[in-house]
Image (cartoon, helix red, strand yellow):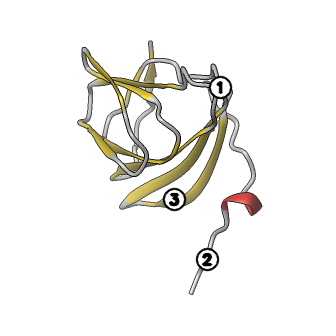
Amino acid sequence: MKITKVKDTPIKENVHKVDARMLYNNDSAQAVHMQLNPGESLKPHITPVDVFFFVIEGTPDVLIGEEKKRIETNSLVESPMNIVHCIYNNTDAIVRILVVKAPRPTTATKVL
């Protein structure tokens, strides 16, 4: 059995300049743990594969296409491939999110 602990996984360098840790990386999918501190956000971007976000902690604002909503803890948000999406922490608390891409992208994400 392979067990991966977030705290033992190094922060992955990323264009968003946030705490992102690759927990799973296989041809079938990728799973990244992201932590957004108060006021932090991702840059709007388009991913060439389907993505879902599972909110572990906090209440981020999530943009999918032209729709932006505040998302509750323990909620899953789907983002279809080739649709602009973004996550914002407009609160005073930490936000932690599990980001899953399926399958693993073979082309680069387009940052807007």
For label 2, the residue is 3
Residue lying farthest to the front in this orientation: 92
Residue at the (27%, 25%) spot, across then down: 83
**87 sits to left or right of 18:** left
Disc 2 residue crowd, few under 14, some 14–19, many 20+, Cα 10 Å: few
Q: Badges 1 and 2: C-beta atoms under 8 Å apart? A: no
Q: Earlier in the sequence, mark 3 or mark 2?
A: 2
| Front residue (pair 27, 16) | 16
> Which circle, 3 or 2, is nearer the viewer?
2
Picture coordinates of residue 5, whole percent (x, y) = 67, 67
Tag 1's secondary structure? Answer: loop
Tell me, for residue 25, which label it has, or none. 3
Disc 1 residue crowd, few under 14, some 14–19, many 20+, Cα 10 Å: some
> Which circle, 1 or 2, is nearer the viewer?
1
Give the CA separation, mark 1 to mark 3: 28 Å
Disc 3 residue crowd, few under 14, some 14–19, many 20+, Cα 10 Å: some
Residue type at mark 1 is: Pro
Give the CA separation, mark 1 to mark 2: 29 Å
- Occupied quadrant, residue 40: top right
For label 1, the residue is 38
| Front residue (pair 8, 68) | 68
| 13 is higher (above) or lower (below) than 90 | below
Residue at the (30%, 41%) spot, across then down: 77
> Which circle, 1 or 3, is nearer the viewer?
1
